[in-house]
Image (spheres, rainbow, N blue to C red):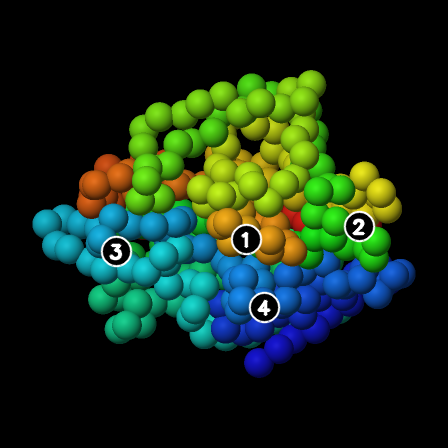
Amino acid sequence: MLYTIENGSIRITVDNKGAEMTSLVLKETGTEYLWQADPAYWSGHAYNLFPICGRLWEGKYTYRGATYEMNLHGFARKSMYEIVEQTENSLTFRLTDNDVIYAQYPFHFELLLTYTLEGASVITTFHVTNKDDKELIYAVGGHPGFNVPLAEGETFDDYTLTFSEACNARQLCFSETCYYTPETKAFALCEGKSFALAHSLFDNDAIFMTDVAPEVTLKSNISGRFVKVTYPGMKYVGFWHKPQSDAPYVCIEPWTSIPADDGRVDDLETKRDMTRLAPGGVREHAFTITIG
């Protein structure tokens, strides 16, 4: 079921399947900023990732001597959520474990996903509660895709990605099978802050970086239209579209963790960059999308 809220600046629509935002419109111009899921390129809009980000080697991980299977990005992006609150400026959806989820992820938890409108911004908040008597181990991430170009007469190459401050960005290295290796390499940024958008950037799949500023802006060099994503507390940010294509969108993906290393089945208790939450504990993670 779809739910829509709006304020004086923007309108969003969210599907209770995956608690996924499916539309983000700037009301002043009527422009749709969110990718509209053309399956020729990518059938998603803005996945919410929990309890893993990315791929597991062979789709498996181990925990306390048992082996579990889980799909790319985890189960939350395809699960059916319950709507628990709708206000003038917010929507909150709830996901809890069930028999199907517990077979993949042996923890009792509650995940609340809240969308809050503030001016021309939408804040996505993951509110995680450990309902178990053991430590909850998880990751969260966003996977929103944005239309590029955003105005007639523009091209994909007319856009630039710029961090909010100069940084010494490190790019995580892919293996040939599109898993990660322990290696990173410097990513060249103009004046330490920006790089031009080009389809060829994604010929080898996504670009993921660490050691970057907590905010990045995708902006047209022609019209000035922009998408700004702010992600305090998220260690990684990625950029992606369908590899080796002319896909007219780009995803900006803030993650707390990353996929499995090439050739290794992760043990959940030693998997890198996972968040750990004590029994009864609560934690929030959030990122903000601002459009103009």
Label 2 SS: loop
Q: Give the percent coordinates (x, y) of residue 239.
A: 55, 43
Q: CA distance from mark 1 to mark 3?
A: 26 Å
The amino acid on which the numbered mark 2 sits, given as a three-letter code, is Glu
The amino acid on which the numbered mark 4 sits, given as a three-letter code, is Asp
Q: Give residue 181's mark.
A: none
Circle 1 residues within 10 Å: few <14, some 14–19, many ≥20: few
Q: Nearer the viewer, residue 284 or 169?
A: 169
Closer to viewer: mark 4 or mark 1 = 1
Q: Are marks 4 and 3 in contact (CB under 8 Å)?
A: no
Circle 4 residues within 10 Å: few <14, some 14–19, many ≥20: few
Closer to viewer: mark 1 or mark 3 = 1
Mark 2 highlights which residue? 154
Q: Are marks 3 and 2 in contact (CB under 8 Å)?
A: no
Mark 1 highlights which residue? 245
Q: Residue at x 32, y 37 (%)?
A: 175
Q: CA distance from mark 4 to mark 2?
A: 20 Å
The amino acid on which the numbered mark 3 sits, given as a three-letter code, is Gly
User: Is residue 53 something one can see in this rendering?
Assistant: yes
Q: Earlier in the sequence, mark 3 or mark 2?
A: 3
Q: Earlier in the sequence, mark 1 or mark 3?
A: 3
Q: Give residue 59's mark.
A: 3
Q: Are marks 1 and 3 in contact (CB under 8 Å)?
A: no
Mark 4 highlights which residue? 38
Label 1 SS: loop
Closer to viewer: mark 4 or mark 3 = 4
Q: Which quadrant would the N terminus be assigned to in this image?
A: bottom right
In this rendering, would 64 be left or right of 75? Answer: left
Q: Residue at x 57, y 59 (%)?
A: 46
Q: Give the percent coordinates (x, y) of residue 104.
A: 25, 63
